Amino acid sequence: MEVEKQLIKLIGDFSGRLPEEYIGEYISLAKHNECAVALENLCTQLYEHDVVPAPGELITIRELAEEMNLEEDTWHFLGHSNS
């Protein structure tokens, strides 16, 4: 599944910027056909940890969310700092 592969790569790209236990958990979710949950959790934790995705990462997040038919409010807040 292409979405799964893209999502796993994206999650891995945040290694070092998010706690490793989150990275492992979200990759596991994606591998077990829970891609929407993994992406939603990733977006939430990026915001909570004040990690602002690079422009290319944000594009990938948006494209994956659209591919999974997730609401825009899943990711739209990520371009802004939490502090």
Image (cartoon, rainbow, N blue to C red):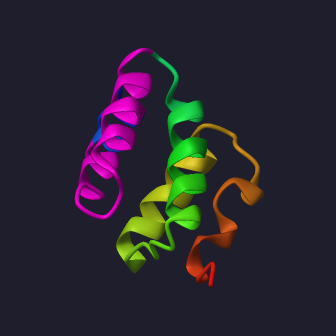
Q: Nearer the viewer, residue 75 or 23?
A: 23
Picture layout, residue 38 above or below residue 75: above
Residue 8 lies in quadrant:
top left
Residue 4, visible in the rendered structure: no
The percent coordinates of residue 33 (x first, y second) are: 47, 17
Left or right: 80 as drawn, with respect to 59 = right
Residue nearest the observer in this picture, 48 or 9: 48
User: Residue 76 in the image: x percent, y percent?
Assistant: 68, 68
Residue 3, given in percent of the width and then of the height, sits at: 41, 35
Measuring 34% from the left and 51% from the top, which residue is drawn there? 19
The quarter of the displayed image where residue 2 is located: top left
Q: Total marks drawn?
A: 0
- Characterize the magenta stretch by its predominant secondary structure: helix
> Magenta includes 70?
no
Looking at the rendered image, the quarter that the N terminus falls into is top left
Horizontal side of 30 relative to 48 (left or right) equals left
Q: Is residue 28 above or below residue 75?
A: above
Q: Which residues are magenta?
A: 9-32
Please say whether residue 2 is visible from this viewpoint.
yes
